[in-house]
Image (cartoon, coloured by chain):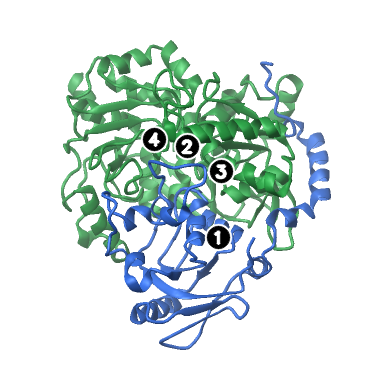
Chain colours: A green, B blue
Amino acid sequence: MPRTLFDKIWEFHCVGRRADDRDLIYIDRHVLHELHAHHAFAQLRKQNRDVRRADLTFAVQDHTVATTPGRDDDTNPSGTAFLKAMREGCRQYGIRLFDIDDPDQGISHVVAPELGMVLPGATHAVPDSHASTVGGLGALAFGCGTSELAHILATQVMALKRPKRMRVRLDGRLGAHINAKDVALRLIADLGVSGARGYVVEYGGAAVAAMPIEQRMTLCNLNIEMGGRSGFVAPDDATFAWIEGRPFAPRGALWDRALDHWRTLVTDADAVFDREVILDCAALEPQISWGTDPSQVIGISGCVPEAAAVEPSRRAAAEAAFAYMDLAPGTPLMGLPVGRVFIGSCTNSRLPDLQAAAAVVRGRRVANGVVAMVVPGSSTVKREAEAAGLDRIFRDAGFFWGESGCSMCAGGNGDRGLPGERVVSTTNRNFENRQGLRVRTHLASPATAAASAIAGRIADVRHLLAGAA
Amino acid sequence: MQPFTNHTGIAAPLLLDDINTDQIAPILQSRGLKDDYRVVLFNRARWHEDGSENPDFVLNKPQFRAAGILVTGQNFGAGSSRESAVWSMLANNIRVVVAKSFADIYRENCLQNGVLPVVLGPEDADAFIARVVATDGAAPFTVDLVTQRISGPGGPDIVFDIAGPDRTRLLEGLDDIGLTLKHMDEIVSWEGRAAVSQPWLQGANDNRR
């Protein structure tokens, strides 16, 4: 019987079925972060259990670390206890920790792929809803809660109900300065914030095939924002080339064997999906969120919808969003003054994201009164960006250039907007108060964020660059 | 885990869709390893920035201050995987959430903690919501997992569905890790097979070292 790639990965990793009808799915790589891990360590201690496969478990400090240059444990006082508890837990259980001063430190979803821990056809778990970022490499990744995290530590498996299968085919060639962030925002707008609930999504089509690996990660990162259980792109030659030679990737004869296997990781021609979605990306313009959930999105040249144009069941939410965002229905976003711009997070903090932003910023200055920040997704990205001179471009333009971490995405490290501030952010959630009290978040791509920082207003990057030509 | 058999409490209506975990359990500016989850729950909605209570928020209304059941819309618990969004329910003795649907990870987190996630179909949900609104906290409802019934003022019992294994797990308060450890032989033999068929999966070595 023809099978989807999801079925193949799931069935290979299915260890057995539990009495409660859940499949036990083996987790090949498990990556922890300090915001949640200490609860799980405490649970293990209480139950006198050990970590079963510390050799397949890794840990990073990302959610609470300060981004200030020269940072230490105490730079963000509300993070100190978390950093220390993580260190203590990792020491006790023999888990390799990428600590605050480690050259490989960074956001788990950035670090695990760039170190080659994540492999095609492998399973991966992180106690974070954006775990499926690494689906960009063809891995099947699951976000989990804290109890599930303790469960994986103790057993190396996750007890899961088998999700349904969705295929999203992204057709067409993306226009200049349009990337995976714009595609994902459009998709979430079309399907809604629970449109993929209960599904594992396989992304494919011409637009995906043409995407660099980092953009595939951005696409898979945002899968949870439409409620998806996981999301991935089948691996191809670009994937294999990206992984080869990375520190934890297999080498030599083992690499050759792995590669032979990875080339079989495709959905069979006649395999059936529970749902199929097609989006033509050819005419897509830069996308930006106007509201307080990631489905409230318009094209950059569009207008905030009129209440009457919103589907009745979503109207109350739209009305609340108009008020929170201080927006009049039917008006454009373009031209609205912004107070702050944030470029970073597991969604958009890899080197090509920073390159896209730097290409916009180069030779320009951040508008007066705008606070603009770039926070690389890992210390490695930061070093590579500095070697390429990107930090100079950003700093010369008036951007803050930070140390790596989750930073303003959820504000867990104290990086937040001011009350009422309008922010253009390359992150993943525009929920009320997430980036600071009353902060009004507009989600957008790195290029759009950079253009808005320069203009001091929500801007169309294509206009800005055309004006310069 | 604390077993769940039945729970009687005031049912509070929070009739919005897509309530996310940043709303349920916001990351507060000052926090520690173990927050006071009683205060975390819907913190931004319950208190104004100056620390005063928001009298308009449902859980601050006199008749709902001791609510034990939360009644809400579609896709409850969307967003971040943070389990504090369930712990903060427990800390406030809210042991049942009745919704039109739940976000996947949130529902799992409920099952891990002895919080009963009840999903009602559209008709039952609307009928129940109407009764909850009409009752306005004047009398409690009882949610019984043994009989799978919600009973209370304003109408007949409402029968709800829940997957049998999830029901058993809640009723017996089964230890999730314990359930899996019964399969340790299978896990070990899987590892043995994988080490042969896909050996790169069973080791993660830093080749720089």
Point 21% across, 60% down: residue = A307
Query: Where is B37 relative to A32, above or below?
Result: below
The mark lying in front, picked from 2 and 1, is 1
Q: Rate crowding at label 1 as few (under 14), some (14 to 19) or many (20 or more) other CA atoms within 10 Å.
A: many
User: How far apart are the two marked residues, 2 and 4, measured between alpha carbons?
Assistant: 9 Å
Establish whether labels 2 and 1 are both on one chain.
no
Determine the chain carrying the residue at label 3: A
Q: In this view, does B206 lie to the left or right of A141?
A: right
Question: Who comes first in sequence, dot 3 or dot 2?
Answer: 3
Q: Residue A208, labelled with which disc?
A: 2
Determine the chain carrying the residue at label 1: B
Q: Where in the figure is residue A108, as x and y percent of width and height?
A: 54, 33
Residue type of the residue flagged with mark 1:
Cys
User: How far apart are the two marked residues, 2 and 1, measured between alpha carbons?
Assistant: 36 Å
Image quadrant where residue B55 sits: bottom left
Q: Is residue A94 left or right of residue B46?
A: right
Residue type of the residue flagged with mark 4:
Arg
Q: Nearer the viewer, residue A238 or B17?
A: B17
Q: Nearer the viewer, residue A20 or A449?
A: A20
Point 42% across, 38% down: residue = A412
Q: Name the residue under label 3.
A: A127
Residue type of the residue flagged with mark 2:
Val
Establish whether labels 4 and 1 are both on one chain.
no
Q: Is residue A197 visible?
A: no
